[in-house]
Amino acid sequence: MHPKTAFIVVSQSQTLARGVCEVVASLAPEVLIEPCGCHDEGLGTATEIISAQVSVIMEKLSEQDSIVLMADFGAARLACQQVITDLGMRVLRLGRGPIVEGTMAGAVAASQGAGLAEILRAISAASQFFPEEDAADILPPPPAVDPLAPRTVLYSGEHPLSARPAARLARIATGFDAQVTLNGVQAGSVLALMGLKINPGDEVTIVATGSQSRNALDAVEAELTGQTASSARESSQTVQPGAAQSLPVSPDR
């Protein structure tokens, strides 16, 4: 039995439209399916191009047969809707589904003798080929944060990093078997730290190397941000390198 529904694949690319027809024809060769794009192999389409193709297809069908327009997106879909409105033909419908999977599902249904309503439902159901997925299930996991990578934090002191807080910070930095720098200067030098002229809310980048570099990073970060060393360690494991973080300084600082 000859299928009673034909398909016109409307795309802004004639090459794409032909490709869809080629794929679908291999699965439902008895179904009439034709491409519709630009005449000059460029990009875009227009209502007159679609209307002309509809007229050509109608000449090959009986009065009871129907045509389903399958469009990719944007202007092609709008042009199809305009053609359907202008022609006012009940047998001319727009398939609402992905252009490749939808056309395939509709053509296969047509080849099995399905009516127009059933074909349109098959086209709509083709969206199941794209199940909703969390991006985390598709993208690779982000790289683990190196606990020894430089950390950028916000200085949360109530006053600029002057002599007293600089001296306290220097003592902390030199209390580990590690070389620590703040914004590129040695953290063990009070004068160097004061020379940075760090004010509350300024970003400070901490770098540490050595056998106790992780502990040094945690302790220096805690001093700068008002956290405990354990809290600083936990934060460093969840915040990407370069992301500034800040917590209020405890009253005794």
Image (cartoon, grey):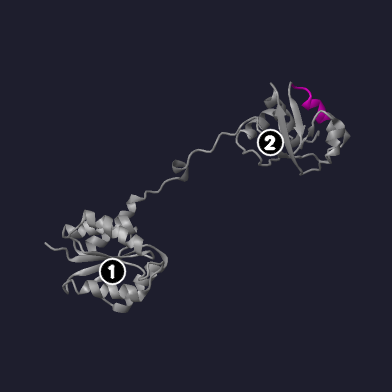
Magenta span has 106?
Answer: no
191 sits left or right of 220 in the view: right
Residue type for callout 1? Arg
Report the span colored magenta. 168-176
Disc 2 residue type (three-letter): Arg
State how far apart marks 1 and 2 are (Cα). 60 Å
Which disc is residue 93 wearing? 1
Q: Is residue 249 above or below residue 215?
A: below
1 or 2: tag closer to the N-terminus: 1
The residue located at (75%, 22%) in the rendering is 176
Label 1 neighbourhood size at 10 Å, few (<14), some (14-19), many (20+)?
many
Q: How far across and down, in percent of the image, does residue 54 sit?
A: 27, 73
Residue 90 at least partly seen: no
Assign the magenta stretch its main secondary structure.
Answer: helix
Q: Residue at x 20, y 65 (%)?
A: 5
Query: Which is more toward the observer, 10 or 245?
Result: 10
Local secondary structure at mark 2: strand
Residue 210 visible within the image:
yes
Vertical relation: 172 (above or below) 1: above
To which residue does mark 2 refer?
151
Residue toward you, 6 or 42? 42
